[in-house]
Image (cartoon, rainbow, N blue to C red):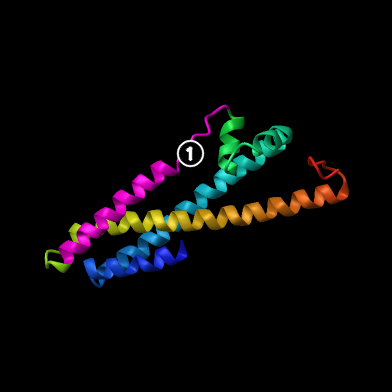
Amino acid sequence: MTVLAVLLFAPAWFITSPWGLAVHAGALLVGAGGGLLLARARSRKFEASIRDGWSNWMRFAVACESVADIHRRIGGGGTQNRAALHAIFLTILWSAEVAFLALAFGGESSLLLGSPAIALLGMVTGGMLAAALQYQLWLRGLEQSVGELVDSGELGVWGVL
């Protein structure tokens, strides 16, 4: 994700140099802040749900692909894979940026024309990057806490005791 964020600076430069870089960098920062806040709020919901229903989490963990799927399943929601929706959204954004890049190489580029696509793609990329980092940190802490509880004998996990 970090590589993607850095690689997207190149189209931003070619579409509306040098302002495209500033728009992309600013959008990355805004997106990173929003992604971090959203991921923190979601991980707190996950923690509260784990505290309330450890047995349900362990039961559904076998059948679900992600932590978010487990949380949705416990809450009564479906576990349909939302990756296809995310892929469609990102494909539309990337296609828009490619179109604006083609216009830029044809000499038709302007800051007003390309900035919305650059900014939206930068915010999405920054948000995804920050959210992924936040979730990784949260999962490391959860893994360490569960490991300590299992080691102390306070918590039994299937196949461990």
The crowding category of the residue bearing disc 1, from other C-alpha atoms within 10 Å (few below 14, some 14 to 19, many at least 20), is few
> Which residue occupies 40% across, 68% down?
6
Closer to us: 49 or 146: 146
- Residue type at the position of mark 1: Asn
From the viewer's perspective, tell me whether residue 39 is left or right of residue 157. left
> Which residue occupies 25% across, 72% down?
18
Residue 42 among magenta residues:
no
The number of callouts visible is 1
**Residue 143, image x, y percentages:** 71, 52
> Which residue occupies 79% across, 40% down?
158
From the viewer's perspective, tell me whether residue 73 is left or right of residue 30. right
From the viewer's perspective, tell me whether residue 159 is left or right of residue 135. right
Closer to us: 128 or 65: 65
From this viewpoint, is residue 16 visible?
Answer: no
Image quadrant assignment for residue 161: top right
Q: Is residue 161 above or below residue 115?
A: above
The part of the chain drawn in magenta is 76-104
Image quadrant assignment for residue 136: bottom right
Circle 1 sits in a helix, a strand or a loop, which is it?
loop
Residue picked out by circle 1: 81
Q: Is residue 112 above or below residue 88?
A: below
> Which residue occupies 16% across, 68% down?
105
Residue that protrudes farthest toward the left in the picture: 107
